[in-house]
Structure formats: structure tokens, C-alpha cells
């Protein structure tokens, strides 16, 4: 049996969420990776059990086009004989596999935490429902099963032995209609980092003070190679878009570092950031609930602490 995995990149390396998808895929058979990039991180893919990697050159498909990506996966399913297609449960992963299901007529299950083959075309699975408040046991019957993997419930674990990755360059057959919806990316944003896949997230809450207060957080995130996230009150006030919201009704994040600035730490927000490996909180209130979940805390004014951090990071980069 062969599992085909869509791998998203962050700074040229597989995003953490994609490593989690690769980990789950190993339980389904041989693992083949699909990468929409000019180069493949062979060493990392080999450590996670990938035997074959299909490179979709950016010259053949410029920018992110969900239907074109799905059409490409559909072609590779036929070429590889894959019995399952997986992606991380990110915005892109869910969107591309939804398109793939529509193109092929195959069923799709989102946000899975466990998938087990069970005789032929059947897979038993466990997946998140209701933003993770409910775990659903289900059975999928399909010639090719489509799954996205919950980004906060499957640990990224390397394989016991490293695989030698065979790289294939694949040129998809696309129609003009497949490229109607496309997001062109500038070089500065081509790394592919999103809130769900970023290794560093700088979060801002009510304590930021208003829309203009996020400029230092954006600068800090840039210096750390991360992205900005926000609490629900920030989106409710209209200071930032909902796509940046961290929380039970927003995005669940699993970064190496979550720097929470001026965020009190409501239960809804903690549900979204609990998967972070390290949480550092900056808050003027020593009794803020988020401090109980933080590995480190700075009791102080973020408008003084953040500029100091930025200055220190700049100094370290100066030769």
C-alpha cells in the first residue's frame, strides 16, 4: 500500500504540520511525498520514512492554485497507485484535499488523529469534531482514502531508519480552468509559513492597545522568522483579521515558541495554543491566567519589552 502526502514547506524545510502528516502516513504503507517547489529537502524527508518524492516545479505551476494542486495530486494517484492521500490539517491542506475529493468523487475526512487500514478499501479513523471538543470514531470505505491530519494531536516522530529518497520531477497536465483561482506569492512571502505551520508565533491581545500597536509585533515576528497571531478580542474589535486568531474558534497552533504579548489567556485561547512547545508570556498583570500555562513570564509593559527584544536581536545580527 502507498500513501501520498502533500508536504508544505517553511523556509525550504517541511513544515511541522507536514512532518506530523508524514508520521501518520507511515502506518498506512510506503510513503511518497509531493512537494510544490524547485528543490526537495531529501534528508528531512528520508528521516521521516519517505521513499519517493515528486517535485512539482514552480515554473510549471506559479503560485498557489488549489484546484491545480488537487489536479496534480489526482494525476499522481493514478501514476503511483496510491491507496491514500494525506495532507496537514492546515488551510491549504484542507482546501486542496477538498478540491481533490470534488475532482475524483472520493470521500475526505478532515483533522484525523489516527488512521488504521482495515482490509482492502476500508480505513478506521479517529478525528476531531467541534473544534476538538469531540473525537469521532468512523469507518471510511473508498478505493483511495483522503485524510488531513490534526496539527495539534499527532507528534512528529522520525522513522527508526532513514530512507533513501528517490526524486521524480513531475509535470502536471492542467487545464486553463485549473488556474483561474491562484494566489501569486512574492519572494518575501514564498516560505509558505502560516499560523498553523509556523515554528514561531508572536501573539497579541487587548494589551497591544489598538491596530497600530501590532507594528512592533510584526517586526519581532520577522526577526524571529515567525508570524503574528491574535486573541479573539482583537478580531472582535476589528484590529486584525480572523485568519490570525489563535483559539478554539480560530487556529490551533503548534510552534516551537509562542510569545504571548498582552494576552490574558481565556480558556478559548489556551485551547488554541496549548500545543506550543514553549510559551513565553509578557503581561503587566501577575495574575493573568496565561501565566499558569507559560514556561517563562515577563511581568512588564509589552510596549517597553518588545522594543528591547527587537533592539537585542538587531544587535546580535550586526557583524
Image (spheres, helix red, strand yellow):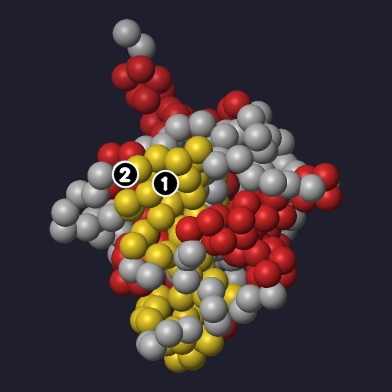
Instruction: Quarter of the image for the C terminus: give it.
Output: top left
Query: What is the x, y in percent for residue 165?
Result: 31, 44
Whether residue 137 appears in this view of the structure is: yes
Q: Which corner quadrant of the image does residue 155 belong to?
A: bottom left
Q: Which residue is mark 2?
A: 165
Q: Earlier in the sequence, mark 2 or mark 1?
A: 1
Query: What is the x, y in percent for residue 23?
Result: 32, 62
Label 2 crowding class (10 Å Cα cut-off): few <14, some 14-19, many 20+? many
Residues tagged 2 and 1 counted as in contact (Cβ below 8 A):
yes
In the displayed structure image, the side of residue 177 where residue 121 appears, left or right: left
Q: Which residue is mark 1?
A: 53
Q: Considering depth in this image, is 242 or 176 the residue closer to the camera?
A: 176
Marks 2 and 1, how far apart at CA: 7 Å
Label 1 crowding class (10 Å Cα cut-off): few <14, some 14-19, many 20+? many
Instruction: Quarter of the image for the N terminus: give it.
Output: bottom left
Which residue is at a point 31% across and 59% down the rendered structure image?
156
Query: What is the x, y in percent for residue 40?
Result: 41, 37
Regarding mark 1 in the picture, which secondary structure is present there?
Answer: strand
Amino acid at each position: 500500500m502507498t500513501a501520498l502526502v502533500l508536504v508544505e514547506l517553511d523556509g525550504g524545510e517541511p513544515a511541522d504540520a507536514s512532518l506530523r502528516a508524514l508520521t501518520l502516513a507511515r502506518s498506512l504503507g510506503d510513503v511518497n511525498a509531493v512537494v510544490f517547489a524547485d528543490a526537495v529537502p531529501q534528508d528531512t524527508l528520508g528521516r521521516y520514512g519517505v521513499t519517493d518524492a515528486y517535485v512539482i516545479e514552480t515554473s510549471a505551476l506559479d503560485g498557489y492554485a488549489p484546484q491545480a494542486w488537487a489536479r496534480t495530486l489526482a494525476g499522481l494517484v493514478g501514476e503511483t497507485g496510491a491507496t491514500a492521500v494525506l495532507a496537514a490539517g492546515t488551510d491549504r491542506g484542507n482546501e486542496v484535499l477538498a478540491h481533490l475529493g470534488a475532482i475524483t468523487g472520493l470521500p475526505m475526512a478532515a483533522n484525523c488523529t489516527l488512521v488504521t487500514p482495515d482490509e482492502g478499501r476500508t480505513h478506521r479513523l479517529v478525528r476531531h469534531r467541534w473544534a476538538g471538543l469531540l473525537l469521532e470514531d468512523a469507518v471510511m470505505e473508498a478505493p483511495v482514502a483522503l485524510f488531513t491530519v490534526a496539527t495539534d494531536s499527532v507528534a512528529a516522530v522520525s522513522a527508526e531508519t532513514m530512507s533513501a529518497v528517490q526524486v521524480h520531477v513531475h509535470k502536471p497536465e492542467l487545464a486553463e480552468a485549473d488556474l483561474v483561482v491562484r494566489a501569486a506569492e512574492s519572494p518575501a512571502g514564498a516560505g509558505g509559513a502560516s499560523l498553523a505551520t509556523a515554528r514561531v508565533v508572536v501573539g497579541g491581545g487587548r494589551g497591544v492597545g489598538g491596530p497600530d500597536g501590532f507594528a512592533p509585533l510584526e517586526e519581532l515576528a520577522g526577526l524571529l522568522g515567525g508570524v503574528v497571531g491574535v486573541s479573539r478580542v482583537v478580531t472582535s474589535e476589528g484590529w486584525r483579521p480572523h485568519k490570525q486568531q489563535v483559539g478554539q474558534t480560530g487556529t490551533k497552533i503548534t510552534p516551537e515558541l509562542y510569545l504571548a504579548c498582552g494576552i490574558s489567556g481565556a480558556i478559548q485561547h489556551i485551547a488554541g495554543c496549548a500545543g506550543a512547545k514553549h510559551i513565553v508570556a509578557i503581561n503587566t498583570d501577575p495574575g493573568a491566567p496565561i501565566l499558569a500555562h507559560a514556561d517563562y513570564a515577563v511581568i512588564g509593559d509589552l510596549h517597553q519589552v518588545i522594543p528591547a527584544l527587537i533592539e537585542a536581536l538587531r544587535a546580535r545580527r550586526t557583524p
